[in-house]
Amino acid sequence: MSPFKNLIAATAILLMLSARTSGDSTSPPPHQARIAELLARMSLQEKIGQLNMRGGGQPMDVNPGMRDQNLNELLGEIRSGAVGSLLGANGADYINKLQRCAVEESPHKIPLLVGNDVIHGFRTIFPIPLGEAATFQPELIERAATVAAREARAAGTNWTFAPMIDVCRDARWGRIAETAGEDHYLGALMAAARVRGFQGDRVDAPDRVLACGKHYVAYGAPEGGRDYNTVDVSMQTLHEVHLATFHTAVRAGVASMMTSFNEINGVPASGNEYVMRTVLRGDWAFGGFVVSDYNAIPEMILHGYAADRADAAAKALRAGVDIDMCGFAYRDELAGLVASGRVSEKLIDESVNRVLRAKASLGLFESPYSDSSLEKRTLLAAEHRALARDIARRSMVLLKNNKELLPLPKSIKRLALIGPLIDSRRDPLGTWACYGEDQNVVTVRAGLAAALPQTEILTARGCDVRGESPFGVDEAVVAANAAEAVVLVLGESEDMSGEGHSRASIELPAPQLALAKSLFDTGKPCVVVLLTGRPLAIPTLAESAGAILCAWHPGTECGHAIADVLLGDFNPAGRLPATFPRATGQIPIHYNHKNTGRPPTADRYTSKYIDVAWTPQYSFGFGLSYTTFAYSDLRVEPATVDADGSIRISVNVANTGRRDGEEVVQVYFRDPIASRTRPVRQLCAFERVAIAVGQSKCVEFSISADLFAFYNWDMKRVVEPGEIELYVGGNPADGLKTSVQVIDAIAR
Ligand code: BGC
């Protein structure tokens, strides 16, 4: 590894991400003359059409007459210029047909934006984003996004509603699956990586798509973990945590942003002038366009923020939403609002200008069509699957490995493979795998069978994923007793996480728990593999399983990747991007909490529970390996640093076990005394390094003191003078300690 390779990771989220697309507001907008000329020719209705997104999916009605009628209706709207963008259209031929209607038959021949939720792959499905984050390898996730963009664009999509960059500290929320977890530093690096992967250097290349940072903002902090629920956060936390990933995405050149469904401190995101005009367009100089979430503009009526659809449309446009996603408030109300003087046409022109610029940046005016032969060659290409397998195994987190039960020996004669998910094809794809196909998924059974051709695999389902009670425990126990070891696959079906799928209890469903207990009672060595879309509360497994591997929802290559890890062809090194609590009632629980005036001790009157330990089951940053690592020689220089300077940290990491392996070296800091209290730990650098058995590596980081900044009581972003403690190790709980003195304060 080259010295100070982490310069990019540690200091340059803020400095080195150059803007490259229509999000770039520092260079003169390209194609401006053509756009100005076009805008001058457009009627008000046609301009409003550019701000209207409607569903564009292939009509599915069984009745062919109905189907044709629906398609004709869609084509009619496109032809009249009433639609600027589509949601959910798929397939090069179909999209070409719609595009042809727009560019040959609509009044000003303006091509369509075609948006889709390409969240963790298009046809080749990668692990859910929470799993991707567990790799702690942003550069790899950039490659996954590149593959997703290549497949999506080949199939006609030119805009993805990704990356999803909400920060979430509440595993009840179903959409934690789509996030990079609880930490905004890790989330910011993942956000930038995905933006680069989707958009590349030139978004008009035939294998790139516009990215969309969503959901702006603080959608990941709903009260009670309930989707769409109220968000009430301090302005400091809003800026330090929730806005941070979006700011990084803007610096990386993200072309668009999507508003969130929630309100922020009383003002719904889609009508929130502060977050859109003051912060996004003002402070950050974002030059791209903003789309509302689905129907979010009229929903401001139910929020109690808009009187009616016209009021909602006016408030959204004034606040800075350019495109109305399927709410049709712009389509129906904007002309009247202009006529009555409540909305100025100039505001509409500004929004249309941004939308047209995005279309021009994609090269759509010159080449609006996709090549359908490319689609066939691109989707699910062998190298895409190979990358999906590699990322899936890199995402897996070894949570427990008693007496080195894993890896299992390939010489095993009889293995029991048990659980409700062993043959599932849909569930391993996870949430938002819209264009992933079940038939391409390698099941857990198929993966293990391929890797163990000489082994007899005895299978039993045991129970349903959910449901009342287990139905096949006896059969499962018979299989376990006849085998040398058990692989028990438990967790969540794909519909137990994702949008609108929050859970009030994140414990294992009762039938699965009963099945697990019966198998533990057999005394057979038992490895639990968790397929899950979120952290789970698994105290019984943590206590009684021989080994636990968290595999998330790993995507198309599920079975192969799991076999690679279980059998030792790949030594796991994934780390948790979100904390696993011991019980749902501990939520919110996250590693970067505050200390309180009474941090937990054995004393009664300290900050803890009477019925459950206060510590997490498995913390953010935690993950085991089949080998062990030892840290030594931690150095920091210089010993004092200006607030606008940077420090260098180096540490020696030795592989002290019996296998080659990878270690995620993590650097945390703590500001022990500040004018506003700071978290007990904050991640500020990491690197996943490969170290051969018996070898050691000097791992070096350069960390900008700007990362120690926070918002003070007066909402000034400050780096205060004083000691900063630094911790370097394999997770936030332990590690070597040093410190540095910040000698000069700054406030911005
Ligand atoms: C989701 C968005 C998604 C949109 C379009 C909404 O319900 O919140 O994340 O991009 O639908 O599918």
Image (cartoon, rainbow, N blue to C red):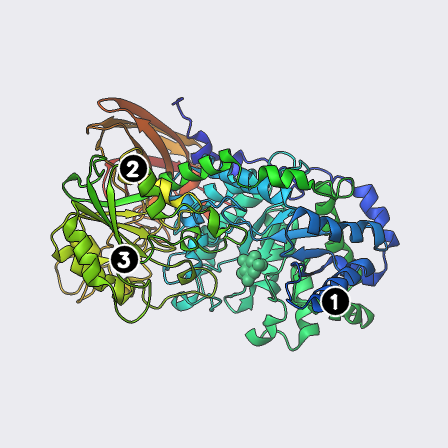
Query: Residues at badges 2 and 1 in contact (C-beta under 8 Å)?
Result: no
Q: Is residue 123 left or right of residue 111?
A: left
* Dot 1 alpha-carbon crowd within 10 angstroms: few under 14, some 14 to 19, many 20 or more: few
> What residue would you read off at disc 2?
453
* Figure quadrant of the N terminus: top left
Q: Label 1 amino acid? A: Gln
For label 3, count other residues whose C-alpha is less than 10 Å away and answer few (under 14), some (14-19) or many (20+). Answer: many
Q: Nearer the viewer, residue 247 or 159?
A: 159
Q: How many marks?
A: 3
Whether residue 671 is visible: yes
Q: Is residue 310 above or below residue 542?
A: below
Eye-nearest disc, 2 or 1: 2
Q: Amino acid at mark 2?
A: Pro
Disc marking residue 581 = 3
Q: Position of residue 197 (x, y in %)?
A: 55, 38
Q: Identify the mark at residue 69; answer none if there is no mark.
A: 1
Depth order, front residue of 407/93: 93
